[in-house]
């Protein structure tokens, strides 16, 4: 425990030092104050935008887009991935398409989608969907294929029918991969939504705030939104997916198969 | 981290070659046929949903007059420059973090705070600080792809077995030899994973950065610019080139790199 608190102390010390260094640079006047605001200014911008509710509105619309797109990707990617793992014909059809589309960064589609669907929510949601689909699909596919064939035969020998086999063996067996897929999908989606919001300006959204603040040299607001973006990303990565993992695969003792 | 993916399923034993080709080509034919039917049926305006023939014609025209290759070359050079910066800085910082307690104390909190922010979110900030154009784009790509490289290098150096280090020292290896013959090869699988993730990251945001940073040449900028003129055929040709470059990165760079080093040394099967 003492080693842990020591490393926390060290981390805090480093961050304080870095903040002090930044503050000194910002106050030294080497850079234009508009481009490098002092930390109190950034904190002020953060508090002010939180207090009047604009920042919360921006965060809410970004979250809405991410979660909407991510759910679409899960709804589409999970069944297709599982079918790919179970049926050779599906794999033969989907895999070549997926491997040709996957290397295209989702942001490359933004201008195309803008022309097709107009500026606004639809573009951002579809870009998130595109970004999140492939990690979901591929992880579900490899998860199903990684289920130990011995378990399948054992379950079969004990008289499990197709239905029980699927829900009791394949799904739990593939779950470490599926959760990894969900995690990767969220990370990709989080990058994609910020980029899509910058390019397909739509009045609300954290990416849009940053981009819009650039036009007015509101660097303090930019840094404040960066902090909010980082905080939300951190919360999802650690708290949401971390506890999801603890509640499922860790409790079932499945994690070692995912690593092997 | 199943990022590797062969193009389609590999040949199964005793399967003739033409069947493999056919199996992989078939889905594209189906999707292409559906696209063509929708495009020709006139459900959407032809300007926004061009037929494959129009796209191919645009692709051919732009390739012949050298515009498309120029855009593609600039994108690849930018990717290379940004990634080279990230590789050098990332591996150096990662090794320093793995070997020295003090460097770890300094860098780990900074890296952990920077990592959860998506790289593209820094783009406007970089544009303000370094101006529109190439400098911002390359620096941002480098900055973003450095994170996975630092993390993996650090993990790799830490994962070198203590017993290898001690036995090398017992056999009289000095620091330079220890580093060159034990730590570097031992950490290499992780470093390569980091480089791979970094390059993938760089590729994923580069196109977006090009759109935002108003670089004079580059595929992202070409697609974004063509949107103003409703040149959907040009845009889709650009997306096709992006797909080709992405596939080439996966096939030629990642898979080769792994075969040449780690697999050959027997560090990974």
Image (tube, coloured by chain):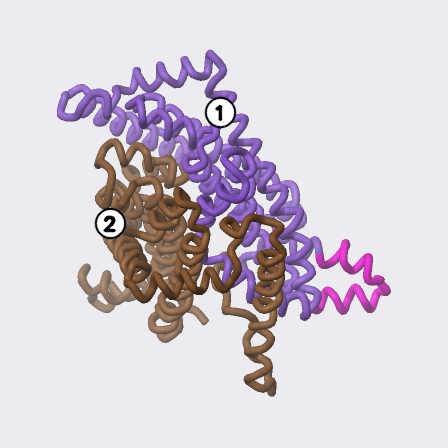
Chain colours: A purple, B brown
* Letter of the chain that mark 1 sits on in the rendering: A
| Residue A70 relative to residue A159: left or right | left
Residue A145 percent coordinates (x, y): 64, 64
Q: Residue at x 34, y 40 (%)?
A: B212
**Residue A148 belongs to the span the image colors magenta:** yes
**Residue B32 belongs to the span the image colors magenta:** no
Q: Return the mark for residue A58.
A: 1
Count up the numbered dots. 2
Q: Residue at x 20, y 66 (%)?
A: B172
Dot 2 crowding, Cα within 10 Å, few <14, some 14–19, many 20+:
some
* Marks 2 and 1 belong to one chain: no
**Disc 2 to disc 1, C-alpha distance:** 35 Å
Q: Residue at x 60, y 37 (%)?
A: A68
Which span of residues is magenta-colored?
A147-170
The residue that label 2 is drawn on is B89
* Letter of the chain that mark 2 sits on in the rendering: B
């Amino acid at each position: 425990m003492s080693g842990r608190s020591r490393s926390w102390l060290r981390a805090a010390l480093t961050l304080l030092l870095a903040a002090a260094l930044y503050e000194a640079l910002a106050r030294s006047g080497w850079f234009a104050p508009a481009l490098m605001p002092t930390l109190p200014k950034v904190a002020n911008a953060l508090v002010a935008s939180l207090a009047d509710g604009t920042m919360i509105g921006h965060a809410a619309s970004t979250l809405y887009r991410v979660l909407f797109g991510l759910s679409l990707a899960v709804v589409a990617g999970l069944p297709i991935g599982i079918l790919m793992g179970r049926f050779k014909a599906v794999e033969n059809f989907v895999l070549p398409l997926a491997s040709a589309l996957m290397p295209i960064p989702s942001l490359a589609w933004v201008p195309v989608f803008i022309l097709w669907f107009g500026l606004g929510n639809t573009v951002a949601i579809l870009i998130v969907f595109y970004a999140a689909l492939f990690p979901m699909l591929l992880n579900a596919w490899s998860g199903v294929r990684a289920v130990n064939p011995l378990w399948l035969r054992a379950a079969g020998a004990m008289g499990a029918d197709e239905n029980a086999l699927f829900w009791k063996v394949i799904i739990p067996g593939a779950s470490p991969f599926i959760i990894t897929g969900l995690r990767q999908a969220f990370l990709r989606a989080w990058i994609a939504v910020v980029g899509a919001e910058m390019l397909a300006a739509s009045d609300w959204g954290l990416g849009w705030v940053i981009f819009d603040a650039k036009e007015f040299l509101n660097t303090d607001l930019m840094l404040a939104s960066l902090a909010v973006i980082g905080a939300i990303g951190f919360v999802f990565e650690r708290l949401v997916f971390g506890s999801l993992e603890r509640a499922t695969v860790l409790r079932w003792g499945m994690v070692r198969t995912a690593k092997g | 981290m199943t990022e590797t993916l062969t193009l389609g399923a590999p040949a199964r034993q005793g399967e003739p070659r033409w069947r493999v080709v056919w199996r992989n080509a078939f889905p594209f034919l189906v999707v292409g046929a559906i696209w063509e039917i929708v495009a020709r049926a006139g459900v959407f305006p032809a300007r926004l949903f061009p037929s494959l023939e129009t796209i191919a014609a645009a692709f051919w025209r732009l390739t012949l007059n050298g515009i498309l290759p120029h855009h593609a070359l600039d994108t690849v050079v930018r990717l290379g420059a940004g990634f080279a910066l990230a590789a050098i800085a990332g591996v150096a910082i990662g090794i320093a973090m793995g070997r020295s307690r003090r460097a770890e104390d300094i860098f780990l909190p900074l890296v952990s705070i920077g990592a959860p922010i998506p790289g593209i979110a820094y783009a406007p900030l970089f544009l303000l600080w370094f101006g529109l154009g190439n400098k911002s784009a390359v620096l941002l790509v480098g900055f973003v792809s450095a994170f996975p490289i630092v993390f993996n290098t650090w993990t790799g150096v830490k994962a070198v077995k203590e017993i290898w280090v001690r036995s090398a020292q017992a056999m009289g290896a000095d620091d330079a030899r220890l580093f060159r013959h034990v730590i570097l090869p031992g950490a290499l699988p992780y470093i390569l994973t980091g480089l791979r993730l970094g390059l993938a990251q760089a590729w994923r945001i580069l196109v977006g950065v090009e759109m935002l940073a108003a670089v004079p040449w580059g595929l992202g900028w070409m697609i974004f610019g063509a949107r103003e003129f409703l040149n959907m055929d040009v845009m889709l040709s650009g997306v096709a080139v992006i797909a080709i470059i992405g596939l080439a990165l996966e096939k030629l760079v990642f898979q080769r790199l792994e075969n040449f080093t780690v697999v050959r040394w027997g560090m990974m099967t």
